[in-house]
Image (cartoon, rainbow, N blue to C red):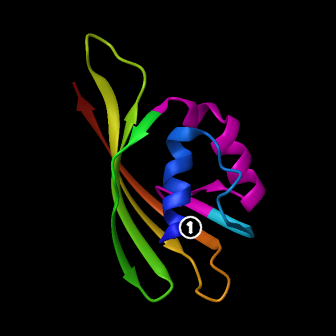
């Protein structure tokens, strides 16, 4: 769970240097590949505009099934319009083999919502 938590923390801190990505890690969101390698994911989390709008994440609820870590949490964004902002419920499954503790695969499902 520590590897998954490091990734979730990096979403809002924009510092992914300590996230243990496997070199061949990929991320799939809504059926599309959005992360092409561990280094690509690290660069995106550190400097990508798609992550820079994230202000915070809520504490995740984790479940574990073998090498799969399932996390549910919310992502809260910075931009506001009339006191409201678009946020997202996030449901991510990480493949993190106990043998190396690195994130090998991430499958993400996002459900947007409006928050005050």
| Dot 1 crowding, Cα within 10 Å, few <14, some 14–19, many 20+ | some
Q: Which residues are magenta?
A: 27-54
106, 69: nearer the viewer: 69
Q: Would you say residue 37 is visible in this rendering?
A: no
In the rendered structure, the answer to whether residue 43 lies left or right of residue 108 reads right
In the rendered structure, the answer to whether residue 61 lies left or right of residue 27 reads left
Q: Position of residue 6 (x, y in %)?
A: 55, 58
Up-down relation of residue 2 to residue 51 (above or below) = below
Residue at 62% over, 30% down: 49
Q: Residue furthest top?
A: 82
Q: Is residue 22 magenta?
A: no
In the rendered structure, the answer to whether residue 12 lies left or right of residue 65 reads right
Up-down relation of residue 53 to residue 62 (above or below) = above
Q: Which residue, given by chain and number where applicable, does mark 1 sit on?
A: 3
Residue at 66% over, 36% down: 48
Q: Position of residue 4 (x, y in %)?
A: 51, 65
Residue at 56% over, 67% down: 3
Q: Position of residue 74 (x, y in %)?
A: 33, 47
Q: Position of residue 68 (x, y in %)?
A: 47, 80
């Amino acid at each position: 769970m520590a590897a998954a938590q490091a990734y979730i923390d990096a979403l809002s801190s924009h510092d992914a240097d300590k996230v243990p990505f496997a070199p061949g890690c990929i991320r799939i969101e809504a059926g599309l590949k959005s992360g092409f390698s561990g280094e690509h994911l690290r660069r995106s989390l550190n400097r990508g505009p798609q992550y820079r709008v994230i202000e915070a994440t809520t504490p995740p609820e984790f479940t574990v099934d073998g090498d799969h870590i399932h996390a549910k949490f919310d992502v809260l964004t910075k931009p506001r319009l009339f006191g409201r902002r678009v946020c997202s419920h996030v449901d991510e499954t990480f493949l993190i083999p106990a043998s190396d503790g690195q994130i090998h695969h991430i499958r993400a499902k996002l459900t947007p919502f409006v928050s005050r």
